[in-house]
Amino acid sequence: MSKYHNSKGFTLIELIIVIVVLGILAVTAAPKFLNVQKDAQAGALEGLNAALLGASEIVYAKALIEGTQGSADTTLTSGIRVRYGYPYATQTNLKEVADFSEDDWKLSGSAPEVTFTLERQTADLTNAEIAANDVCKVTYRHPNQGEKPTITVTDCN
């Protein structure tokens, strides 16, 4: 007799049970992994929101120093266009104010409101489709006198 003759392997039933258990684990864990993408998109939106808030406050401080915070439309010595001290809502101006990659963000609209959407999510959409659909976006609206700019985050669904 061979020394391997008495060794046992797994039965078909045992293999099926292992496969079923792995299937159940995969079904339970898959939604959590799929949710990571939505969490990453929401995090990117919150990051841009914070960058726009911080940058607009810095620009306002510069406008105070230059004494232009009361003007409806003027340009600071740094070249940034402001409305009542805060960044004016044009794509070019907001690119100057906030440091972000155009590979990641698609901008649409102009004064009084500019919308930032995730490039990978909206690359094939027109500006009208972006406005009509509920996509992940950050909207910057420049202020009226005595107000701060309105920055709105529309979360991913």
Image (spheres, grey):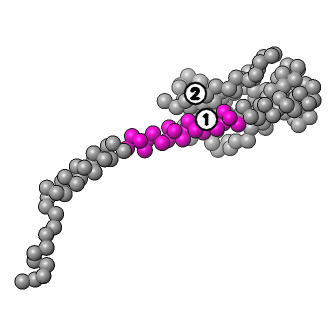
Image spot of residue 146 (x, y percent): 80, 16
Q: Which residue is mark 1?
A: 45
Of 106 and 147, nearer the camera is 147
Determine whether 130 is above or below 33 in the image.
above
Q: Quadrant of residue 34?
A: top left
Q: Which residues are magenta?
A: 30-51
Name the residue at 23% across, 53% down. Answer: 19
On residue 27, the disc is none
Q: Which residue is mark 2?
A: 154
Which SS class for mark 2?
Answer: strand
Of 28 and 45, nearer the camera is 28
Name the residue at 43% across, 44% down. Answer: 33
- Identity of the residue furthest to the left in this view: 1
Q: Quadrant of the N terminus?
A: bottom left
Neighbours of disc 1 within 10 Å: few (<14), some (14-19), many (20+): many
How far is disc 1 from disc 2 in space, using C-alphas?
Answer: 8 Å
Q: Quadrant of residue 11?
A: bottom left
Name the residue at 87% across, 35% down. Answer: 79
Of 133 and 1, nearer the camera is 1
Neighbours of disc 2 within 10 Å: few (<14), some (14-19), many (20+): some
Kindly identify the amino acid type of the residue bearing the numbered disc 1: Leu
Image spot of residue 8 (x, y percent): 13, 69
Q: Are marks 1 and 2 in contact (CB under 8 Å)?
A: yes
Which SS class for mark 1?
Answer: helix
Determine whether 104 is above or below 63 in the image.
below
| Residue 101 visible within the image | yes
Image spot of residue 12 (x, y percent): 14, 58
